[in-house]
Amino acid sequence: MRPNLQQPQISIRKKRSFKKRWVLLPLLATYIATIVWYTNKPLPKGVSYEGEVHRVQNVDFLFFL
């Protein structure tokens, strides 16, 4: 008698989901890293987002269609 030396077969569906996971994980990690970087990135010197409060009475909304 010969021993059974065959390895178990992995289904094609499992192989595809495994490949998808290895493609999607780096893309997701890059996406999250980009969000974190641009959220916490310091502004260049001389640029400020703070300013005086301006009170106005007549405001026109300009739009182009």
Image: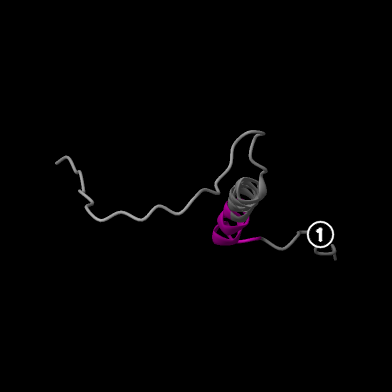
* Left or right of 52 in this view: 3: right
Q: Residue at x 81, y 59 (%)?
A: 5
Pick the front one: 16 or 5: 16
Magenta residue span? 10-20
In the figure, 46 relative to 59: above or below? above
Neighbor class of circle 1 (other Cα within 10 Å; few <14, some 14-19, many 20+) is: few
Pick the front one: 36 or 46: 46
Magenta stretch holds residue 48: no
In the figure, 51 relative to 46: above or below? below
- Residue 12: where, in percent of width, then height? 56, 57
Q: Secondary structure at mark 1?
A: loop
**Residue 47 image-quadrant placement:** top right
In the figure, 3 relative to 31: above or below? below
In the figure, 43 relative to 61: above or below? above
**Residue type at the position of mark 1:** Leu
- Residue 8: where, in percent of width, then height? 72, 63
The residue beneath circle 1 is: 5
